[in-house]
Image (cartoon, rainbow, N blue to C red):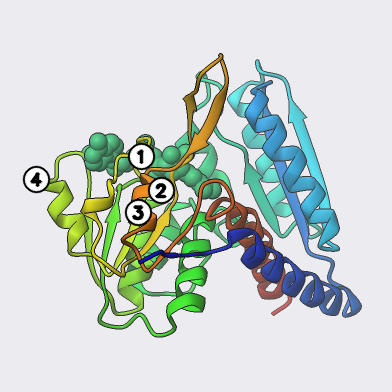
Amino acid sequence: MTARIIDGRAFAAGILAEVATETAALAAMGIVPGLAVVLVGEDAASQVYVRNKARRTKEAGMASFEYRLPEDTAETALLALVAELNDDPAVHGILVQLPLPGHIDTARVLDAVSPDKDVDGFHVINAGRLAAGLPGLVPCTPLGCLLMLKAELGDLSGARAVVLGRSNIVGKPMAALLLRESCTVTIAHSRTRNFPDECRRADILVAAVGQPELVRGDWIKPGATVLDVGINRVATEGNNTRLVGDVAFAEALTVAGRITPVPGGVGPMTIACLLRNTLTAARRSAR
Ligand code: NDP
């Protein structure tokens, strides 16, 4: 068997096109969705992410507001900016790029963002809403995974889903979303006994552990759908590096029914879902 490779770039392009169409319709009613991105410091990877987000935001027809603050910005100054953005009616989504410098309390800053503008879905109110099955803003990466799963498989009800990793940004919200779709959900993590056996039970396997190629081909149930969230940079010959996921892709390809590649799988969906969340927040602000 050779698995069908799920093309995350194509999925993301479809979502971005839908978002652009609906953004234009909302703008015609006088509401231009606006996303504010706040970057503190000079982290090279974060700068690339912020640049990409701003570009995509503008391409979707939304207003993009960028705030680049120096590394030594005081926490009080950052909190003051967040408060200002919370009160700004032109801003519907606020994203504080992580990681923040060490002298800033990340949890305090994330909790200062209005839950209605929390397009990352990291606020405890939104985490609580998701856990309680109430509408709210959902973290972008698991939301992207869910949209791909539903498009690929249709009704997920009754499927046995195993989520590898229990972080607040991927593992836990992913599990909550799959439960909401009536899957039978297991969350596995570093203390799980018989980790490979848990994987082997999965009709849907979502890997988000941040360990290069941890999941081997013989841990996968034949025909399973495998979503690989991991992004790991590994060394190759001659001082080069390449990106790999949490799943040994070549091995998995011969066993799984469907699989996302790295890169080009889950990654592109994250930014598409960020803009989808911004559109959702803008629509709700109009009510
Ligand atoms: P975290 O480091 O916050 O969480 C990793 C989780 O994996 C933890 O729950 C940890 O268990 C578990 N884990 C780690 N090692 C093992 C192991 N050997 N066996 C079993 N479980 C293990 O990571 P994130 O959730 O933030 O990210 C996970 C991966 O997804 C990373 O590679 C990250 O780069 C990527 N990512 C990709 C995104 C995208 O857009 N595609 C977005 C966000 C993340 P424990 O809790 O017990 O420590």
> Which comes sooner in the sequence, label 4 or label 2?
4
Q: Is residue 114 depicted above or below 44 in this figure? A: below
Q: Answer with the quadrant where ligand 1 appears in the image.
A: top left
Q: Are marks 2 and 3 in contact (CB under 8 Å)?
A: yes
The residue where tag 1 is placed is 213
Q: Is residue 159 depicted above or below 115 in this figure? A: below
Q: Of circles 2 and 1, which is in front? A: 2
Label 3 sits on a secondary structure element that is helix
| Residue 77: numbered disc | none
The residue where tag 3 is placed is 252
Amino acid at dot 2: Phe
Q: Is residue 70 left or right of residue 230?
A: right
Q: Position of residue 95 (x, y in %)?
A: 64, 46
Q: Are marks 2 and 1 in contact (CB under 8 Å)?
A: yes
Q: Position of residue 81 (x, y in %)?
A: 71, 37
Q: CA distance from mark 3 to mark 4?
A: 22 Å
Amino acid at dot 4: Arg
| Residue 193: numbered disc | 4
Q: Is residue 204 depicted above or below 252 in this figure? A: below
The quadrant of the image that shows the C terminus is bottom right
Q: Is residue 92 left or right of residue 199?
A: right
Q: Position of residue 235 (x, y in %)?
A: 48, 22
Residue closest to the eye, 95 or 158: 158
Q: CA distance from mark 1 to mark 4?
A: 19 Å
